[in-house]
Structure formats: C-alpha cells, structure tokens
C-alpha cells in the first residue's frame, strides 16, 4: 500500500467513526428535546445520560478530521478551505450554539426546556450541512472565477445530490441515534423508553435506506464518474443491504424471557453499523484517487513523505496510549449498571 | 477594510474570545487538583466543596471553550489556506498530538464529573491529574505552532515550494520551550487569580468568623499562594522570552521597547507611547542601560533598533503599550500575592484591610487583561509575517471574499455566548449557594 493510500484510509476511518458517533450525538440531542414533556417515560433522561459524558469526546473527532486532512493532504486544504468558507462557518456557528446551550441546559433550572430546544434544533442542521462536503468533492459545484475557486452554493442546495445527501444525513441521524438509544434503554431496563426508541428506529430505518438509494440515483445524473466507479463495488453494496436487512429485522427478533417487547437492539446496532461501514467503504474506494474531482487527487495533494512518517508513528503511539482511557470510559458510562440505571 | 484586514480581525476576535476560556481551561484544573489534594492532606471537607463548585463552573466554561477552540482550529484552514498548506507539510505534528491531549482531557473530565460518586479519592485525584496534563499539553502543543510562526525551522521555501522538510526540527524550533513555558505558567497564574477574585469578593460580603468566612479565606489564601508562585515563574520565564526575541526576532523586541537606534547601553523605556514622526517613545521613564542588560546580561550588549529594518517590515508600533501592560500587570500581581502572604502569615492578621481586598478582587480581570495583551503583542508583533521572514500574512489569506459578513456573524455569536455564560454561572450559583453545600457536609459528618 502506498503512503497516500494509508493516509486516505486513516482519514476515511476518522470520517466514518465521526459520522456514526456524530449522528448518534446530534440525534440524541434531538430526541432529548422531543420527549422532554413526557416525564413518565424517562426517554429524555436516557438520552441525556448517554449525551452528557460523550458529546465532548465526539466533538474532538471534528477537529481530528480537519487536522487529518490538513496534515496528510495540505494540497486539498487549500481548495476545500477556500470553497467551504461559508458552509464551514455556518457549521461552526451552529456547533458553538449547540454545544454551549447543551451545557447551559444542564445548569439552568427553570430554563431547561427553552435551552434544550435551541440545542436540539441547531444540532439537527449540523449533519445536513456537514454532509454537503461530499457532493462538493464530487465535482460540478466549484467554479474558477478570476483565478480563484468559488463554491456555487445556490446550485448545490437546489441540486438533486445536495437535497438527497441532506435527506440522507437527517434520516440517518434519526435512525442511528434511535437505534443506539433503544439498546441503551434496554440495558437500563427502561421498557417504556425502549418502546419509544424502538418505534422511532422502525420508522426511520426504511427512510434512511430509501434516501440512500435516492442519493445513488442523483449521482448517476450529477457525478457519473463516481456512479460508474461505485458499480464496480456492486457486491459490497449488496452486502451492505443484507446487513441492513439483518439489523432492521433484529428489532423483531425474540427479546428474551424478561422482555415485554420483542427485539435484539444490540444486534440491530451492530448490523446497521456494518451496513454503513460497507457502504461508506465502497463509496470511499469509488471516490479514489480524487479528493476533490477533478483537480485534487491523493497524489497531488499529499504531504511531505517525512512529515507523513512522523504523523503516522505519532497516531499509532497516541492511540495506543489512549486506548485504556477509552476502555475505562466505555466501562464507566456504557456498561456500569450503577450509571446506566441510576434514578 | 480589505479582505486581509477583515480576515485578521475575524481570526483575532476568535482567538481573543477563545483565549479567555482556554486560559481558564488550563488554569482551573490545577486549582481543582490542588483543592482535591489539600482535602485529602488536611482532612478538611471545605476543600472538597471548593473542588466540586469550581468543577461546576469549569464544566460550563468548557461548554464554550470546546466549540470556540473548534472554531479557531477550523478557521485556520478556512481563512489562511496558504499558511495551513505550509503547516500541513512541515508542522502538522503538534496539531495532531494536541487532539490526543484534548481527548485525554475530555475523557477524564467526563469521568471526574459524571462518575465522581463511583470513584475512590485516589482515582478522583488521578482523573484530575490526567485532566491537568491533557489541558496543559493542549496549550503547549498549540503554542508550538505559534512558536514555529515566530521562529520557523525544519524547511526552506524556494520559489513558493516547501523543500528540505524535517518535521521534528520544525517541532523543536528555537522558541518552542520558552513560549510554551510562558503560556502554561501564565495560564496557571490567571486561573489562580480568577479564584482569588471570587473568593475575595465573597469574603468581603460574609460575616467575620462565620463558616463561609473561613471557607472563602482558605480559598483566597490558596489562590494567592498558587497565583504568587506562578506569577514569579511567569516573570522569570518572561526574561528568557525577551532574550529569545533579542536573538531571533530583533525587530519585535525593538518595537516592544520603542527602540529606534541600534546601540549598546540601550535604555529601557517604561510607559509612554511610540511616536513614529519623531522616532522616539514619548512620556516614558527611561532607565539607561537596562534594556541591554535584560537582552544580553551585560550593559554594553548591542540591541538592534527599528531603523536597521526596512519600514515595510516593522511591526505596528502600538505593541509597546501592549508589552508594557503585560509586564506591568505581571509585576503588580506578584507584588499583591507577596503582600497577602506577609499580611496573613507573617503579621498573623485575621482579616485584610478593605483597600487590599479590593485589589485582590481585581487580580483576576487584571490577569486576563495581561493574557490578552500578551497574545495580541505576540501575534501583531510578528506582522507583516505569518511565518517570520518566510511567508507574508497577505500571501496566505483566503481568496473567497464575504469575510465582512462572517465577521459580523461571529462577533454576534461571541457576544451572545459571553453574556449567556455569565448569566448561566450567576443563575446556577445563586440557586446553589455555598451555605447549602456547607450544611450538607456538616449534616453528613
């Protein structure tokens, strides 16, 4: 494997981890807002218990992706930094409002509702804007004016790809977060919350699946090169669809003796994560060698080889050092019954 | 204003806003850790309450520090793509390692806050140690990039191309250690004086001899001690920083001191402002020979003046005022903590006089003003370069336009978040007065 491929594979991995974690994060903020008025079922409680310790960690991955791109592919930074000034700034503003008001809502007794609404709504716009980076890199939305590159934002927002990508982002946000929360409420033994989140997952599963199909169709008319490359990975896409089928139907599998409702939410979460993993792997491979079609490739944008080596080594060392910390974190907040089940 | 000025204004405002929260984000964990350790050492539950209450405040501040830091990090690529292209090729390391330092902080901060009831005392202290390490390492690594801008190393530019790259030489650039030390020590100092301000204000309002009075006096003495130690450290390190400028960025030192003629026995100008027309510092107190001595440890050291450099490469002359404000505030804070210590422990007085209390109350805001002056001095003093004598700021700015519109948006959000944070903190601590925490503890024991 060449240095360029290793670098883009690592970057792809960061993007994948963030997109799943962030979908869950933003979606959870949204559900926490939706179920705020129904005090009896504790669905908001469950959402907040997941969100409070985890949002900071999730947020780090935004920076990880930007730094990963800037350090591995400085040549792409120039183009993307220039064309994404406006949408990137909007994302930053929303991110600031969302995070700050999330924290405020936990410290302002009497105002939790209003603050959680601001945080929940702004959180929903972020995935929709973030995903727009993908159609931008597919080509057709960047114009060279007076020697510098400019984004055709109006065209992007009204194009079939722009709209289908945003729909996909929002439905995935709902789907992934409700799935994870149904698993989390099962672990907590909150059957009423489980009933709600399972229902949300059942509603949003097909929605996310069909918006994904719409997205691929939009590619056919607006980024044919990518569509044709994607068809080379036809079997990966089929495998991804099978994973969706397994994960989605797991919501009706028998849930064990004590459960009053059917479903194996843990299997469902794993199945759906595998679905997204396979699909985004196929997408990433089809996208090569372009970072931004048609001018920026992984070769043309690559960093200095010595810098790459130093970065690669320090990534390995840093992840190795932090792994025990992640495991401890996981044990403390995802597995420890004393935390998950607290009143 | 043109796009360059607007981009500088936007990024400068972002940094100016973020620095407040980032500095407290480095400084407060050390105070929380100190309180946790004192609680175990002195077996005094008051220190445990301090740690709890400061952690609550810190958590709210983090809610702004994290997104504003994310904004700063991403804005670098959005506003200065030309600069980040060089950074990406040469000194991407500190940015990348910084993320892991921050992850360490975020993980253990969550553990410390949300799992506190399930942790033993020693695990609590260990978690806080990781938070302190993560926070300091983040600050040090970001300062590393700032140091690289002042003393770029580990590459050459030829016809706009970056060649001969050695990322580790770039990382260990000449001003790294001294700059990182300055940022960390001054952040600890500022965190401590922020606590001192609040404690002094509360102390002034509580009845002498009451439980709250004793609580706030303990907090004040602890903050003054930590603040005094670190302001001494900052001052000593500041001396090294000036010598570093003398060696590597002589025009920056010359602008800081308002020195035009290159000379031995150079005087130190305190106060006043630099007048370009007469090429002198007006209304300043001049101490003959002191600048030479500070720069090179000898009175006949030749210090370069601005006249030696082409006019277009001069830093803005107002940096003299910023530099003086930073140094003056540092000196004042050091003096105040010594007076406080002497008053309480050598003269053994139970209370401080009112005038002294009011001086303690302003230490926190003063320290923050010092931090802002220092950063503005450090960054505008490097102009017109984004990479000293290598890359002009004007050549690295974005071509995208629309920056004026973004400037307004971001300034609006900073004002909103700044006010909201003050409001939330006040609201929370009004609802959770210290008396309740003290009662809870005395009922529990």
Image (spheres, coloured by chain):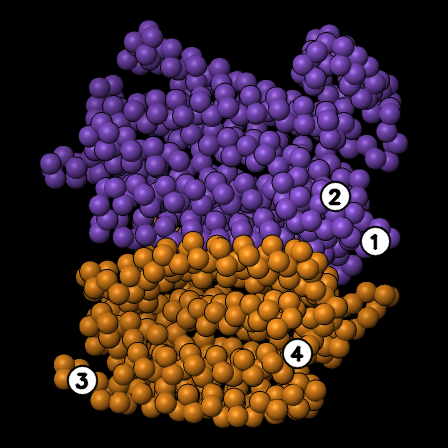
Chain colours: A orange, B purple
User: In the image shown, does A139 or B388 lie closer to the viewer?
Assistant: B388
Q: Which residue is mark 3?
A: A256
Label 3 residue SS:
loop
Chain containing mark 2: B
Q: Does residue A218 appear to the left or right of A299 in the view shown?
A: left
What is the x, y in percent for residue B87?
68, 52
Q: CA distance from mark 2 to mark 1?
A: 13 Å
- Quadrant of the frame with the C terminus of chain A: bottom left
Chain containing mark 4: A
Numbered tag placed on residue B160 in the rendering: 1
Q: Which residue is mark 2?
A: B387
Q: Which residue is mark 4?
A: A288
Instruction: Sort mark 1 into few (<14), some (14-19) or many (20+) by Cα contacts within 10 Å.
Output: few
Chain containing mark 1: B
Task: Note whether B127 is above or below A115 in the view shown.
Answer: above
- Name which of mark 2 and mark 1 comes first in the sequence: 1
Instruction: Sort mark 2 into few (<14), some (14-19) or many (20+) by Cα contacts within 10 Å.
Output: many
Instruction: Specify the quadrant of the image occupied by residue A116.
Output: bottom left
Q: CA distance from mark 3 to mark 4?
A: 45 Å
Residue at image point 78% right, 59% down: B399
Q: Nearer the viewer, mark 3 or mark 4?
A: 4
Marks 1 and 3 close (CB-CB < 8 Å) = no
Chain containing mark 3: A
Label 2 residue SS:
strand
């Amino acid at each position: 494997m060449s240095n360029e491929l290793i670098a883009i594979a690592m970057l792809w991995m960061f993007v994948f981890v963030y997109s799943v974690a962030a979908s869950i994060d933003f979606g959870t903020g949204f559900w926490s807002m939706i179920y705020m008025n129904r005090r009896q079922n504790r669905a908001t409680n469950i959402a907040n218990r997941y969100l409070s310790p985890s949002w900071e960690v999730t947020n780090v991955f935004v920076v990880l992706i930007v730094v990963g791109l800037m350090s591995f592919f400085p040549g792409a930074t120039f183009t993307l930094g220039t064309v994404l000034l406006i949408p990137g700034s909007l994302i930053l503003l929303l991110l600031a409002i969302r995070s700050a008001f999330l924290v405020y809502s936990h410290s302002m007794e009497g105002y939790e509702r209003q603050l959680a609404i601001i945080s929940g709504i702004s959180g929903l716009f972020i995935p929709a804007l973030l995903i727009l980076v993908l159609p931008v890199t597919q080509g057709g939305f960047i114009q060279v004016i007076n020697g510098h590159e400019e984004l055709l934002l109006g065209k992007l927002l009204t194009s079939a790809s722009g709209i289908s990508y945003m729909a996909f982002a929002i439905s995935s946000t709902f789907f992934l977060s409700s799935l994870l929360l149904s698993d989390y409420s099962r672990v907590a033994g909150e059957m009423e919350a489980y009933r709600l989140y399972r229902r949300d997952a059942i509603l949003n599963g097909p929605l996310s699946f069909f918006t994904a199909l719409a997205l691929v169709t939009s590619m056919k008319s607006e980024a044919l090169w990518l569509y044709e490359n994607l068809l080379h990975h036809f079997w990966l896409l089929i495998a991804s669809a099978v994973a969706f089928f397994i994960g989605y139907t797991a919501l009706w599998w028998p849930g064990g003796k004590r459960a009053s409702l059917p479903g194996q939410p843990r299997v469902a979460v794993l199945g759906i994560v595998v679905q997204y993993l396979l699909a985004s792997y196929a997408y990433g491979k089809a996208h090569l060698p372009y970072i931004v079609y048609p001018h920026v490739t992984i070769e043309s944008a690559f960093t200095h080889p010595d810098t790459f080596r130093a970065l690669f080594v320090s990534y390995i060392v840093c992840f190795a050092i932090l792994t025990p910390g992640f495991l401890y974190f996981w044990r403390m907040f995802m597995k420890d019954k004393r935390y998950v089940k607290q009143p | 204003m043109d796009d360059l000025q607007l981009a500088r204004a936007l990024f400068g405002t972002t940094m100016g806003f973020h620095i407040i929260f980032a500095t407290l984000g480095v400084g407060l964990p050390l105070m929380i850790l100190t309180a946790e350790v004192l609680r175990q050492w002195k077996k005094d539950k008051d220190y445990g309450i301090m740690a709890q209450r400061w952690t609550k405040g810190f958590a709210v501040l983090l809610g702004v520090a994290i997104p504003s830091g994310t904004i700063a990090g991403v804005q670098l690529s959005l506003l200065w793509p030309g600069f980040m292209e060089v950074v990406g090729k040469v000194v991407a390391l500190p940015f990348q390692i910084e993320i892991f330092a921050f992850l360490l902080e975020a993980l253990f901060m969550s553990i410390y806050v949300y799992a506190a009831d399930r942790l033993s005392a020693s695990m609590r202290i260990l978690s806080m140690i990781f938070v302190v390490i993560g926070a300091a390492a983040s600050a040090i690594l970001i300062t590393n990039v700032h140091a690289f801008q002042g003393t770029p190393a580990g590459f050459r530019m030829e016809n706009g191309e970056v060649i001969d790259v050695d990322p580790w030489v770039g990382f260990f650039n000449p001003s790294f250690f001294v700059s990182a030390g300055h940022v960390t020590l001054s952040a600890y100092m500022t965190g401590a004086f922020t606590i001192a301000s609040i404690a002094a204000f509360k102390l002034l309002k509580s009845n002498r001899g009451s439980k709250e009075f004793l609580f706030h006096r303990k907090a004040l003495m602890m903050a003054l001690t930590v603040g005094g130690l670190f302001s001494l450290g900052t001052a000593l390190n500041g001396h090294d920083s000036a010598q570093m400028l003398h060696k590597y960025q002589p025009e920056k030192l010359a602008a800081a001191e308002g020195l035009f003629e290159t000379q031995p026995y150079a005087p130190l100008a305190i106060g006043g402002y630099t007048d370009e027309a007469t090429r002198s510092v007006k209304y300043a107190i001049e101490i003959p020979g002191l600048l030479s001595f500070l720069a090179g440890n000898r009175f006949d050291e030749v210090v370069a003046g601005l006249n030696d450099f082409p006019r277009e490469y001069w830093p803005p002359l107002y940096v003299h005022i910023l530099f003086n404000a930073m140094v003056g505030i540092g000196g004042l804070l050091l003096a105040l903590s010594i007076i406080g210590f002497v008053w309480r422990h050598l003269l053994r007085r139970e209370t401080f006089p009112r005038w002294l209390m009011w001086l303690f109350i302003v230490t926190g805001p003063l320290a923050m003003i010092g931090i802002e002056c220092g950063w503005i001095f450090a960054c505008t003093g490097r102009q017109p370069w984004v990479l000293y004598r290598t890359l002009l700021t004007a050549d690295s700015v974005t071509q995208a336009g629309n920056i004026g519109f973004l400037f307004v948006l971001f300034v609006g959000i900073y004002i909103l978040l700044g006010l909201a944070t003050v409001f939330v903190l006040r609201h929370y601590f009004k609802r959770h007065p210290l008396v309740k925490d003290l009662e809870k503890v005395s009922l529990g024991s």
